Image (cartoon, rainbow, N blue to C red):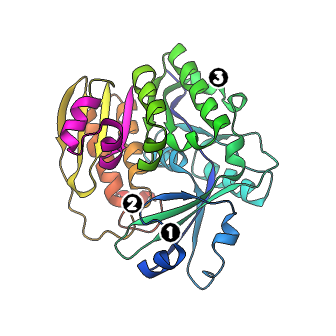
Amino acid sequence: MKRYDVYAIGNALVDFLTFVDDQFLIDKGIRKGLMTLVDQPAEKTLEGLDHRDIVRCSGGSAANTIVGLALLGGKGCFTGKVGDDDLGKFYGANLQDAGVEFFVNPDSKPTGSCVSLVSPDAERSMLTYLGASTQLSDIDVHQDALRESQFLYVEGYLWDSPPARAAAIHAMEWAKRNDVRVAFTFSDPWLVERFRDDFTRLLDTYIDVLFLNEREAGEITGYEDPLMASKQLAKKVKQLCLTRGEEGAIIASNGRLRSTPRLTIPKVVDTTGAGDLYAAGVLRGLSLGFDLSTSSMIGARVAAAIVEKVGARLTAADLH
């Protein structure tokens, strides 16, 4: 029996979340609903917002997923690069408090951050400063921990940094050599547009379980119809999870497609982390030996819980 359910690798970013109106996004020229890279730490980005309530926690897409997995009773570990600074120390302590083992060699660059601006329709627009996370390299991959994991989970955001991209590929190669299943999330339609050839090669070479949404599916396949896109992708990966927001998800296992039904959500407050927590539920279910349909329903219920509150962190009470 392996020691860990999931070994995750991704950008280690401290998340700062606050609410804004649509006019604020327009005035600042911020692309609504997407992730935008910025060249300044969160402190600069947050200037002028000091009168607002701001939630802070350790984050990054894959980190959100691994924390969600731990909350569901799974055993997970995470590799990401932080700086040797106060935010980096906060990041590590926050992950460990959540029950996640954290492997890192701190860097001299400042710890990365992500400012999530949530608009009244619950859509989030992210301003990401990668900072030290760009210095992640293949020597940071904890090979023993990876070998002792059922799954490797990789976020597509790593492709924005060549060294981090190389680290991700190194981890996937190591996983394949050691009978560890590779799960991957495309992370953002913009990334798929920029790295379509790379992501296509990953589908053909490494990925066993793929997570993506409708817009990303359209970008990678050229099909706007999510069902047609799913049929194409199901030919390339063993298991597919294509999320459709309130419409549920299209899943495929060994080429066979079916749908996860939509769940009724009384009030959507903030969509931050919905995809990350869906992946947490799916990976927890698969690590327990459940089929993909059951695992997808677990993911859907966890995602439904997260959109009813602010931020990408749940408590045990939120799941009851």
41 relative to 291 in the view: left or right: right
The residue at which mark 3 appears reads as: 144
Which mark is first along the chain, 1 or 3? Answer: 1
Asked if marks 2 and 1 touch (Cβ < 8 Å), the reply is no
Q: Please report the bounds of the magenta region as a residue range.
A: 208-233
The residue lying at 22 percent from left, 24 percent from top is 255
Mark 2 or 1: in front is 1
Q: Name the residue that disc number 2 marks.
A: 306
Amino acid type of the residue that numbered disc 2 sits on in the rendered structure: Ile
Q: Which mark is residue 30?
A: 1
> How many neighbours does mark 2 have within 10 angstroms: few (below 14), some (14-19), or many (20 or more)?
many
Mark-to-mark CA distance, 3 and 2: 32 Å
Q: Return the residue nearer the eye: 111 or 89.
A: 111
Horizontal and vertical percent for residue 181?
44, 24
Where residue 202 appears, as percent x and y from the top left, is 45, 27
Task: Tell me if 19 is positioned left or right of 252 in this view.
Answer: right
User: Overall secondary structure of the magenta stretch?
Assistant: helix
Q: Position of residue 68 (x, y in %)?
A: 46, 49
Residue 313 seen by the camera: no
Question: Dot 1: within a 10 Å radius of its alpha carbon, few (fewer than 14), some, or many (20 or more) residues?
Answer: some
Q: Nearer the viewer, residue 298 or 9?
A: 9
Is residue 80 covered in magenta? Answer: no
Q: Earlier in the sequence, mark 3 or mark 2?
A: 3
User: At numbered mark 1, what does the secondary structure look like: helix, strand or loop?
Assistant: loop
Type of the residue with mark 3: Asp
| Mark 2: secondary structure | helix
In percent of the image, x 51 and y 50: which residue is there?
64
Q: Which mark is residue 317?
A: none
Q: Is 287 left or right of 93, judged from the image as shown?
A: left
Residue at image position (29%, 39%) is 222
